[in-house]
Image: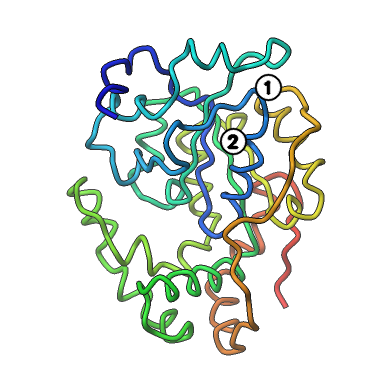
Amino acid sequence: MQAARLTAAHRPTPAFIVAGAQRCGTTSLFRALEQHPQMTRPSFHKGINYFDLNYGQGAGWYRAHFPLEVTQRFRTRRAYRPSLPFEASGYYIFHPAALPRIARDLPDVKIVLMLRDPMERAYSAWKHEHARGFESESFLRALELEDSRLEGEVERMLADPSYESHAHRHLAYATRSDYVPQIERLLSLLPAEQVYVLYSEDFFGTPEQEMSALTTFLGARDFPGIIFDRHNARPSGSMPREARDVLQVKLRRTYEEISELVGRPSPWRLE
């Protein structure tokens, strides 16, 4: 990494960023994108987490994660140029400081979002955090505790850029599934023509069609050799009825307004 930082000036910033949302299939999307000959992933790992957790490391540290520009030109097939560097973090869309930082530092970057049925995303997130040991409560109890757990956390994060909120990152289930306020904030920072939203249900249902539309948005050529698969999926039982009732109240606005905001009908329905 230290050697890469010395050559940071010769490394690009991303042409686009997959900014979330968590537990919506962004890893599967990342694995598909990295197969495209025009797309250049970070050299080390998928999640740089620069604009949310590592912003204090500085721009040189960030650029050190991408291959040298000359290396990208060498790797990219002549028929599939220019190279489009990208990275992904499922926390960017939700972290209170990440989007303003992106808009300030990379005003021309394109943002890609992958969104899943909000209630299913919340339940999947709880299972994920519970399995990792970050959550000890039942899903229903976690939803009941969520507001008190998050109280004041955004303000602390904005007041102290070095502060990492465990509750905000790991225990925000309904709030993180409330996509409409997050997308509205994004659209207040970057032009709508730089933002593209995929529904994960559509992506996994017709991946070739969805990828073709995405590559068109990114200014890339279609590439027929991509293999689509699911990554980081967790087996899912039925969500408790009581928890579903709570989420229907908390997430009603997102269900009702997401289609108009995105400009494309969502596949989700309230019961």
Query: Which quarter of the figure is the N terminus placed in?
Result: top left
**For the residue marked with disc 2, what is the amino acid?**
Val
- Mark 2 residue crowding within 10 angstroms, few (<14) / some (14–19) / many (20+): many
Residue at screen point 59% across, 87% down = 240
Residue at screen point 60% across, 76% down = 248
Residue at screen point 69% across, 52% down = 199
Query: Which quarter of the figure is the C terminus placed in?
Result: bottom right
Q: Is residue 246 left or right of residue 197?
A: left
The quarter of the displayed image where residue 145 is located: bottom left
Viewer-side label of 2, 1:
1
**Where is residue 4 drawn, in percent x and y?**
32, 22
- Mark 1 residue crowding within 10 angstroms, few (<14) / some (14–19) / many (20+): few
Q: What secondary structure is found at the residue carrying circle 2?
A: strand
The residue that label 2 is drawn on is 195
**Where is residue 28 drawn, in percent x and y?**
62, 49
* Above or below 18: residue 159: below
**Where is residue 239 drawn, in percent x and y?**
61, 82
Judging depth in this view, the residue of 29 and 144 nearest the camera is: 29
Judging depth in this view, the residue of 31 and 144 nearest the camera is: 31
> Mark on residue 219?
1
**For the residue marked with disc 1, what is the amino acid?**
Gly
Q: Is residue 5 left or right of residue 120?
A: left
The quarter of the displayed image where residue 32 is located: top right
* Above or below 241: residue 15: above
Q: CA distance from mark 2 to mark 1?
A: 13 Å
* Above or below 239: residue 56: above
Residue at screen point 43% across, 44% down = 47
Q: What secondary structure is found at the residue carrying circle 1?
A: loop
Judging depth in this view, the residue of 65 and 93 nearest the camera is: 65
